[in-house]
Amino acid sequence: MTDRPFPVTPGWLDWYRGPSKPRFALPPGSVDAHCHVFGPAAEFPFAPERKYTPVDASKHDLFALRDHLGVTRNVIVQATCHGADNSALVDALRTAGDLARGVATVRPDVSDGELRRLHDAGVRGVRCNFVRRLVDAAPTEALEAVVRRVAPLGWHVVLYFEAADLPGLESFFASLPVPLVIDHMGRPDVTRSADGPEFARFLRFVEANDVWVKVSCPERLTATGPRALDGERDAYRDVVPFARKVVDTFTDRVLWGTDWPHPNLKDHMPDDGLLVDHIPRVATTPDRRQALLVDNPMRLYWPEEAR
């Protein structure tokens, strides 16, 4: 786009245009519990401290995808490229009304008025990033201070980290006095066994604490694929044992999301319709799919409506 105020990061992969229509029919009321909006940059500038500059991915694009896939509601997670300016997130939430909730990024010095504004817009959690390539240092002190501010609102904390870093972080995470939601199964190394000690440690951490797990981003975790492209019916086989184990073990504490528009993917951009078709591979019964896609996200984000 010639009117963009920022050049896109070299090599950035645009989101998949024209996704297929899923063959798997999502249960009524399904929630995409992990997705983002980027800009548009001309309206919502990106943060000066950002680590990447993406292609625009607007609220209108997100809601068109929601309807195309058969999703009913979204949980929109603040993108790191916007820093702690939640303007694009709040704008999307207000447009969606009760069909979306949000996860914001806030700093310890956020005002009470701003927290109330975010809550009124539909924010129900804060996200904290511990992935080393995306942050300069582990933000433990800042997160402790933020938790003290948001706990009275009944919010939770969404944590993004990699499996290799969990041993040094799990005691700190367990000390936080709010529910925790883990992005992308804690990014396991899927070249190892789902029955091995590394993933077993993650499962013990979930079992011992007030933790929910997003069974999301197989396209980000995969090592051998195959990719969710060109009608592939058996995508990301190497991720399936990990995701299935989480769903089977913690059926009442799992969530699913597209991660649209899939920031920072380097290898390929998946067809989001095929990502929906991947769900029955990891949630193998109707009851588990109902919990993953409807009941669990409703309890966490729309508790006033949950059954």
Image (cartoon, rainbow, N blue to C red):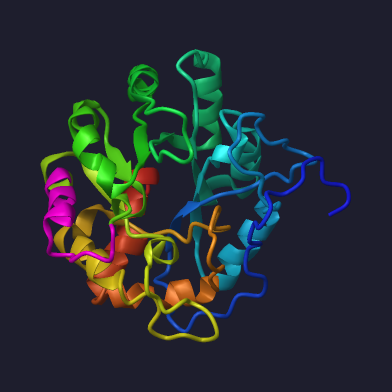
Q: Which quarter of the picture shows residue 250?
A: bottom left
Across and down, in percent, residue 284 comes to 25, 76
Residue at 60% x, 39% y: name it: 81
Across and down, in percent, residue 157 comes to 35, 34
* The one of 202 and 77 positioned closer to us in this rendering: 202
In the image, residue 2 lies in the stretch drawn in magenta: no
Residue at 30% x, 54% y: name it: 185
Across and down, in percent, residue 97 comes to 58, 46
Looking at the rendered image, the quarter that the N terminus falls into is bottom right
Q: Which quarter of the picture shows residue 222?
A: bottom left
Residue 123 can be seen in this image: yes
Across and down, in percent, residue 168 comes to 22, 34
Q: Considering only vertical position in the picture, is 53 above or below 147? A: below
- Residue stretch in magenta: 189-205
Looking at the rendered image, the quarter that the C terminus falls into is bottom left
* The one of 90 and 44 positioned closer to us in this rendering: 44
* The one of 257 and 12 positioned closer to us in this rendering: 12
Q: Considering only vertical position in the picture, is 265 above or below 9? A: below
